[in-house]
């Protein structure tokens, strides 16, 4: 199912299929204006769900916190690949990660994330193998990402933020190399390019690719 570059305001409830016993191969809702989920959404079973370039961090009655959507966890949705880049998301809560046991790859690039919750771990994400967190605002390396034992690909390019409202003064925010990176046994691909690291003190011995 594809609905790209339209004016969708909410995630369509008719895509709910948790009771059907089948999985949709791919859903692409890129470049809409979704800021929530239609009433009646009861979860989704899909191999690949792309929601890039929407407004899920800008909910109705927004309190100023752009949260990663909880609806998938609340409905025990089964998603293998979730692309939710460029959605004005600045917060991922522990509750939003529960029940995402099917998730294998997460693309959350181009948002405003500064930290990851303690719930970003193997218990909640036992099958997660690839994460894309490039172009966010992490001030320090998000150590919790290393609590997911199955991760083999970690992309964390170009972390930073604009210091001024006019968006003319860009600050690269990640300067300290992660102290425990070398202790993760499963990492194969690591891309930290475009940051402001001053020294590289260690790296996993089993890497196939390292970009800094």
Image (tube, helix red, strand yellow):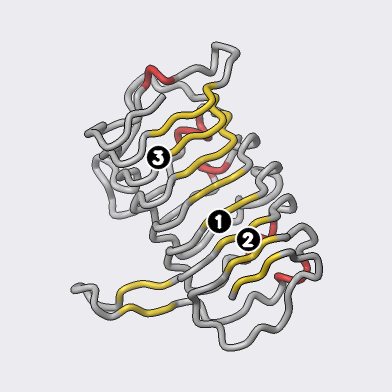
Q: Earlier in the sequence, mark 1 or mark 3?
A: 3
CA gap, disc 3 and disc 2: 24 Å
Front residue of 42/176: it is: 176
Q: Secondary structure at mark 3?
A: loop
Q: Mark 3 or mark 2: which is in front?
A: 3
Q: Residue 144 — which label?
A: 2
Q: Nearer the viewer, mark 1 or mark 3?
A: 3
Q: Where does residue 106 sit, x and y in percent of width and height?
A: 55, 47
Residue 182 sits above or below residue 23 on the image? below
Residue 51 badge: 3
Give the answer, above or below, for where 83 lies relative to 176.
Answer: above
**Which of the two labelled residues, at mark 3 and mark 2, occupies the earlier sequence position?**
3
Q: In this rendering, would 99 be left or right of 50?
A: right
User: Residue 207 at x, y = what percent?
Assistant: 75, 66
Mark drawn on residue 117: 1
Q: Percent from the top left, x then y, of residue 5?
A: 27, 37
Q: Give the secondary structure at mark 1.
A: loop
- Marks 1 & 3, CB-CB < 8 Å contact: no
Give the residue displayed 45% in from the left and 19% down from the top: 16
Q: Which residue is outermost to the bottom?
A: 198
2 or 1: tag closer to the N-terminus: 1
């Amino acid at each position: 199912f594809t609905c790209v570059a339209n004016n969708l305001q909410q995630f369509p409830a008719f895509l709910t299929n948790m009771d059907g016993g089948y999985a949709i191969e791919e859903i692409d809702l890129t470049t809409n204006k979704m800021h929530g989920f239609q009433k009646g959404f009861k979860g989704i079973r899909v191999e690949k769900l792309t929601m890039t370039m929407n407004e899920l961090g800008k909910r109705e009655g927004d309190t100023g916190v752009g949260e990663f959507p909880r609806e998938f966890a609340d409905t025990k949705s089964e998603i293998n690949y979730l692309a939710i880049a460029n959605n004005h998301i600045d917060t991922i809560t522990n509750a939003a990660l529960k029940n995402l046991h099917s998730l294998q790859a997460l693309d959350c690039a181009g948002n405003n994330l500064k930290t990851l919750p303690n719930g970003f771990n193997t218990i909640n994400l036992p099958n997660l193998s690839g994460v894309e967190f490039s172009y966010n605002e992490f001030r320090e390396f998000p150590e919790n990402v290393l609590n997911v034992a199955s991760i083999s690909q970690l992309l964390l390019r170009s972390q930073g933020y604009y210091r001024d409202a006019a968006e003319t003064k860009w600050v690269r925010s990640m300067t300290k190399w992660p102290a425990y990176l070398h202790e993760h046994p499963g990492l194969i691909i690591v891309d930290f390019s475009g940051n402001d690291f001053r020294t590289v003190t260690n790296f996993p011995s089993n890497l196939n690719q390292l970009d800094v």
